[in-house]
Image (tube, coloured by chain):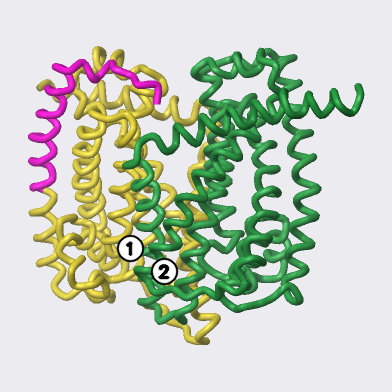
Chain colours: A green, B yellow
Amino acid sequence: MSMSSRLSWFINRFLRPAFGRAYVRIKGGNREPSWILWEILLPLIMITSVIWAYENMGAPEFFKGFVIIGGAMMSYWYNVLWGMGRTLYWEKETGNLEVFLLSDAPLPSLLLGMALGGMFNTTLRSIAVIILGVVVFKAEFNVDYLPLAILIFILTLVALYGVGLALSGLHIVYGRMGVRINELLDEPIMFLSGQYYPISTFPMALQYIAGLIPLAIGLDGVRRALLFSEGIDVLWLHLLILFILMIVFYPLGLRILNKIVERGRKDGRLILRWI
Amino acid sequence: MDIGKWLTRFKAVVWLTWKEQSGWTKPPYYFGYIIITPFFQLILYAYMYIVIAFYSGLVDIEMAYYLVTGVSLYNFIGAGLYGLIWTVHSEREHFRTLKYTYMAFPNLQLYLLSRGFFHYITGALSTLVMLLTGLILTGVPLGTLSVKPMLLIILIILGFLWSSQLGIMVAGSSIFSSEYGPLISEAVGGILFLLGAVLYPIESLPDYIRPFADVFPMREWMELMRYALNSSYNVGDPNQLLFQLVVKTIIYVVAAIIFFRFTENLARKKGLLEATLHH
């Protein structure tokens, strides 16, 4: 295949379906304004509970910022788990997955679309959560370090969505068991990522495990930049780890997805419902 | 109504829920599954206490006891409530079986209660594990606890009663919306977490929020449960609290019966029990 036909394939067969799928997700996720309100208020309830708990314990002021950033960034993990992984399960249950698989669009392209659409929707809500958190709880962030925080954040997202690729494969083949696996990954990742506290307070062994989770490294990096004004001279290791996780997780996720789909085809489980 | 007939149905629905919930794996794995998630939920919050102790260098056993019991006991209420409310959404929208179960068990309120009961049992199991591990993890000496078994049993029954009736009312509302049903259930769970003396005492809430906390029986139940697990825990006058809890529970039961009867009739007239919106 020549270079120009490869590029044409990439644009027409990969990117276009991805943007098409992202459009559906963005349109669907924002068509009802009251949903957006709910999706902002629900995380805020949890954030408020934790901030009041910290206040009651006499925690230092910067913990408010910790909790707000943790709550906002954790939404991306939920999006990977439920918006990306579980969606394929429901597409299978409703009969759409057959259409996806029969179409010309490769599955990773559709997943990319889901990821992009989900990122857009989650970003809208996370920004609102942060703004409300700052206004209501008077949390303070150093915006001079925002560019570095954004760089860390983008690397985190790419690595995280690589994990999402692998998870979506599990959902296609394992059905309800995949949903349970999702549920099992929910709270442990929240804990290991340090949703409400710095992972530097973990015992060393736990810190090494957390180092394998993109969200834990990303969350720590963003907090250090915005709350403790740490620059690239301190956070270069975070960037390096995230870069390594990104180049490992993305191809690995793709490989796992392809393997699982292939196995599903052989076993005839790709369109098997109610399992 | 014939009690014996109802109990037979109740048993069948609890068994059905067990099969539906655990059918994807073997029982030992299922028990592992129902314990892992709440366990990590507990250490997520218990670790907040550990971090503050780490920063301040101070150990506050009373604070640890408050936090661990709050998160663990909330799990009992939350698991049951969420399981009960979610039934309407999952059976009508996901599996489209609500109309069939309604024909087999034509009393939706009792059906939901039976479905929810299973979740209260699994919630109680995981709560027990959470309590024990949480208290050990935060260094609360288990030997100093003095449990009041009779009060504990009464409170578990009352907790099941008021929270399941709250769940019935929320489930009644969720019949009318496929989109908002799950959101409403999450919001109610979140509000109970926020206002229910789970992580902090109600007294530490801003003044304008406290009246909202008094709407729910959660605070009385939580405080009395803490007292029942450790009689040296100060709740002021436990009899007064118990009286308030009983009164609120009665109000919830009556309100749920009236409200659900109204919503069920309206839903039948509008054909909403079999309507799906592919949500």
The reply to whether residue A88 is in sight is: yes
User: What whole-number distance in Å separates the C-alpha atoms at marks 2 and 1?
Assistant: 24 Å
Q: Mark 2 falls on what kind of element?
A: helix
A272 vs B187: above or below: above
List x then y, in percent, for residue A201: 61, 74
Residue at image mark 1: B198
Query: The C terminus of chain B is located in which quarter?
Result: top left
Image mark 1: chain: B
Tell me the amino acid under the disc marked 1. Val
Q: Which mark, by number, is residue A134?
A: 2
Is label 1 in a helix, a strand or a loop?
A: loop
The residue closer to the viewer here, A240 or B272, is A240
Vertical order, B232 against A89 (above or below): below
Disc marking residue A260 = none
Is B258 displayed left or right of A16 in the figure? Answer: left
Q: In this rendering, is residue A98 above or below A203? A: above
Magenta residues (range): B250-279
- Residue drawn at x 49%, y 57% is A72
Callout 2: few (<14), some (14-19), or many (20+) C-alpha neighbours within 10 Å? some
